[in-house]
Every structure is written in structure tokens, then in C-alpha cells.
Image (cartoon, helix red, strand yellow):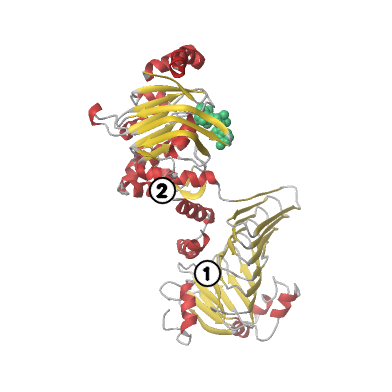
Amino acid sequence: MLRVVNLGAEVEGTPILDHVNLYIKEGQTYVLFGPNGNGKTSLLMTLIGNPAFKVTYGRIMFKGQDINDMSTDQRVKMGMGISFQNPPKVSGLKLIDMLLNCAKQSGTDPNKIYEYAQMLNMEKFLNRSINVGFSGGEVKRSEVLQLLTLNPDLVLFDEPDSGVDLDNISVIGSAMGELLDRKKNKEERKKSGLIITHQGHILDYVDADYGLILYKGMIACMGDPYDMLDEISKKGYEGCVEKCLKGFQNSRRM
Amino acid sequence: MPERIPKLEKDVKEKLEKVGIEMDKEKRSAIFLQVDQNVETSSSFASGIEMIGIKQALEKYDWLHDYFWKVVSKNNDEYTKQVDVAEVNGYFIRALPGIKVNFPVEACLYLKSPKKQKVHNIIIAEESSELNIISGCASHPGLTTGMHLGISEFYIKKNAKLSFTMIHNWENNIEVRPRSAAIVEEGGTYISNYIIMNPVKIVQMYPTVHLNGDNSTAIMSSVIVAMENSIVDTGSRVIIKGKGSSAEILSRAISKGGTIYSRGDIVGESPDARGHLECMGMMLSEQGSIIAIPELEAKHPNVDLSHEAAIGKIAEEEIFYLMSRGFTRDEATAAIVRGFLDIEIKGLPPTLKKKIDEAINLVEKELI
Ligand SMILES: Nc1ncnc2c1ncn2[C@@H]1O[C@H](COP(=O)(O)OP(=O)(O)OP(=O)(O)O)[C@@H](O)[C@H]1O
Ligand SMILES: [Mg+2]
């Protein structure tokens, strides 16, 4: 589904990704951990084609195609989708307008929108300007609602669980499970995902396949996401990364 | 266009249709059409709503002379003086006490010849009445020069509610200088909406609302798009004299190469006067300019006045956000501009809301 080869990227002239390699197969969900300001959001922005983030070297292959020259909307039409950590407010643009466009892209029956909105307790927000005056948790639910309607094949989630109370984490988790085919048997899963999380609460609802740590713009560790979360909480990022990097740097120098 | 205005030439009719002037008695409670200085149509289909030419009205009602040149002063400026002439025409609209009608009143002023159009209107919402007026002003296609001078005097009596939605549709060479003012009595509400999105040579106006009564309200909104070579210099002034009265002045200005002066002035003179002024501007072109000039004046310790102004280009971040949901860059830009213009006007009937949306639809393509 997604193959990132030796990717380097910069924002405003500052390098933020350093030789990133990543391979997500159809049906797989990855979790991305990493300290604040180490490039997690930047990686997602580069994947979805935010013009502020420039690829300096390497390649992004999506569904077998090099997408480097594609605009964001073209990538989305090919089947990528993203939920934002901090989406902007757009005054006058109603949530429902955004959802109708998402439905148009995916061929989703517009009547489904209301059903999804109920699922995420967002039906009262449909006619409000998107993100204007939404609480932190409401923004997160609105993001996942838009993804449900857009129904992408590769779903990128940037901290969908940050600042969300436990009841709402279960609501969001259930929607994410739906989006990522987690309710299906392993062999039947078609959707792929990449989830950024700090606390990992969302992993109680979405069983992920692999975990990664992004450290100083590099993928420093890869492993079982639940073990990784455990180690991060015990040793902190520094401790984990130190352990991983030993083997990793040796192998890269070879 | 229904048969009730048969005298109109084809191209006038076409222009009226194009700018969305609605003269169907099924959809309007009263209609009025003035071409240059001549009243072509003036009729009311609703009991309790009067709609006649101002000349006829002044003959019919002696008391009306007390309302004529009362809130707008004759000697205000050179333009008001020019309207103080015998050939002046215009409309008189009145809602009788307690009258509330669903359909709006449509009043249209049409400039066909290259002379100065001189108009004097009086609008009265009697006690506890509710009146909604749409005023469409347009000029003839291809008119090479022309000037519209319009005096409008509004009287909103006790507990009455008047909404006045003015949609301007001029052309490159037309100069427009309306002079309007309103008096709002106790518990009354005046809602004014002004929309201009087509080219014009210059529009210059600064209507004033006197909130004389206690607990009276004024909401003045404008949606302005200035195309290349257009100058739109507008704003509203509200003088709050009644206790607990409130004023809101909202504007959305887009320059697509033209110059916009977005003014606003709220004067609080009474206890518990509240006022808010909001002016948002968006630059869609490297040419042109937007100048926001908000003013607040407190003349009593117990007033609460605020203002907010911001001018900028469309945020790249917002365009990218929409593109991440599949909008193309152009679609995203259009949706954001549309959202920007979608001013939330409290107390506006749905028919008028629809009317404003239609006006936005008409120019959307030219904006992007
Ligand atoms: N538009 C930008 N302009 C300048 N610097 C930026 C921009 N976007 C990100 N950065 C910088 O790039 C670095 C990586 O930021 P990024 O948002 O990717 O971190 P993150 O890992 O997602 O952190 P967090 O966990 O806090 O969300 C940071 O130092 C950040 O300040
Ligand atoms: Mg981040």
C-alpha cells in the first residue's frame, strides 16, 4: 500500500525527516511514537503532500505509484486520508459541507453521513462552521467523522486520542476500528493505517500490528506496539531509542 | 417578469431578471419599480402594507411632510442638496401598526439614462409591525455614465422590526451616493444588509442609525466585493441614545483589485449601551486595497463597546485542509471565499437569506 524509501524532507529550509523507510502492506496498521517536535506530524504532512513540506530526497510510493509530484487532492482521490492533530478553523464553511464533499469523493451515500455523525455524537455540529468553537475532543471526533465519510484505503491519524476523555476514546476507537478493517479477520483486511499516539489509549480499541519510534526525524525502532508502549512508559524515549539505535546505526553504516 | 409591467423594454426586463429582481405577487407583498425619474410600478398585495410613489404620498398625507428631510438633513452635503428638487421621485413604504407579513416588499431603482437619478424614499414601520424590504438597484447594460443619488429615511416605531436588504448591481461607469438614516424607537429593531459584488465606479455612503428608544437594536451588515477599478467606500454609524440598546456592525470585504474603505462608528451615549463592530477583509488580488476604519466613542461610563478587524489573504493552511478532503485548489478557494462571505445575520427571514446566497452565487465564478 505505502512504501517510503529513504525519505528526507524539510520545512522552511529546516530538515525534519532523515532517511525514513517505511513499508505498510494492505491490511496493516502501524503506530508511530516519538517525543514532541521530532517529526511525526511532519512525516504525515509529507505523505499527504502539504506544500509546506518539501521532499529533499527519497521516494513515496502509494499503491505502486510514485506520488511525489501529486497534489494533496490527487493523493486523496487515490485513496489517502488524514485526521489532523490541529486542523484550522474555517469560518462560514459548515461541517456538513465538508462531509458532503468527502461523500462525493468516496461515493458514500450522503444519507450515511447522519448515521456516522450519530455514531460520533456529532449530529449537533453539522451546521456549524468547521472547528470554530469546537472543544478539543469535538475537533478529534469531527476529524474521524470526516475520515469515515471519506473512507480512504490508507488512513493517517495524527493523535486522534490526545485530550479525549475515556468515553470518547471508545467512540473514536470504534470508528477507527471500522475504518481500518480491524473488525475483520486478518486475511480479509484491506485498509492500512498509520496512527500517531503518545499515551496509546487508542490501542485498547484498535489492535495495531507494528510500532515505530520516530526520533530526531529518523525511524529509530520498530517492534510490537504494545511492548514498545510498555518500554516507553518504563524507560522513556531516550532509553528505548538508545537500545534500538545500537543495532540500527551499525546496520546503516554497513 | 409578470405582465403587470408590460411597458418595460426587453433589455430592461432581462437585466432585472439577471440581477434577481422579483416582481411576482405570489412571492412579494408589494412591489415598486422606478426607472430614472418615473415610477413604472407601485402596488401592494397585502393589506396593511402601503406602497406608493413618494410624490403621491406627500399629496395624500399632510403629516408625511414631518418625516420628509427629518432624519437626513437637506444641507448635509452637495449630494443631499442636489436631491432637493422638484423632479425627485422615490417610494413610500409603510407597515400599519401590528402588521406582519411573510413575504418581503420589493423595491427597485433602475438607472437607464446617463442623467442623474434622484430618489427620496420614506419607510415607516408603525408600532409593533414587522416589515422586510428588498431593495434592488441596478443600471442599464452598457450605460457609459450615470449617477444615483438616493435619500432614504427610515422610521422604526415602538416595538417594530424592519429589515432592509439592499443589493446593488451597477456597472463600471456609475457613481452612487446614497444618503440614509434611521430613527429607532423603544424596543424597535432595525436590520440593514448591504450587498455589492459587481463593478461600479464609486459607491460612497455612511448611513446613520439613531437608536433613540430604550432597548432598541440595530444590526448593520455588509458584504462587499470590489472588482478592479471600483471604489466602495461604505460603513455604518450607530448612535446609541436609548438605555440598554445595542448595535452591531458587521462587514465582509473582498478586494479583487478594487479599493474598499470599510468604515464603522458606534457612539454609546446611554447607560448599558452595547456595541460591537467587526470588519473582516480578504485580498484576492495583488492590486487593490482594503482600508478598515473602525471607530468607537463612549460618552457614558456604563457602556460596552468593542471592535475587531482583520485583513489578509486566504490562509494556505485552510486551502490545504480542504484539499486533504479532496477539494481541488480552486474548489477549496471558492468554498473558503463563500464561507467568508456567509455572514451570520440574526433575525433575517429565510427568503432574504436565500436572496443573499443567490447574489453570492452569481459572482462566485468571477472571484476565483
Ligand atoms: N510549518 C513549520 N514551520 C517551521 N517549523 C516547523 C513547521 N512545522 C513543523 N516544524 C518544526 O518541525 C519539527 C517537527 O515538528 P512535528 O510537528 O513534526 O513534531 P511532532 O513529532 O508531531 O511533535 P508533537 O508530538 O509535539 O506533535 C518541530 O521542531 C517543529 O517546530
Ligand atoms: Mg505532531
Residue at point 47% right, 43% down?
A: B321
Q: Percent x, y for residue A115?
A: 32, 42
Name the mark on residue B125: none
Relative to A214, residue B243 above or below? below
Q: Is residue B279 toward the left or the right of residue A244 in the image? A: right
Mark 2 packing: few (<14 Cα in 10 Å), some, or many (20+)?
many
Kind of residue at badge 1: Ile
Q: Secondary structure at mark 2?
A: helix
Q: Quadrant of ligand 1?
A: top right
Residue A251 seen in the current view: yes
Foreground: disc 1 or disc 2? 2
Kind of residue at badge 2: Ile
| Of the pair B28 and B344, the residue shown nearer to us | B344
- Give the chain letter at badge 1: B
Residue at point 37% right, 45% down?
A: A77
In the rendered image, which residue does mark 2 sit on? A96
Relative to A242, residue B5 above or below? below
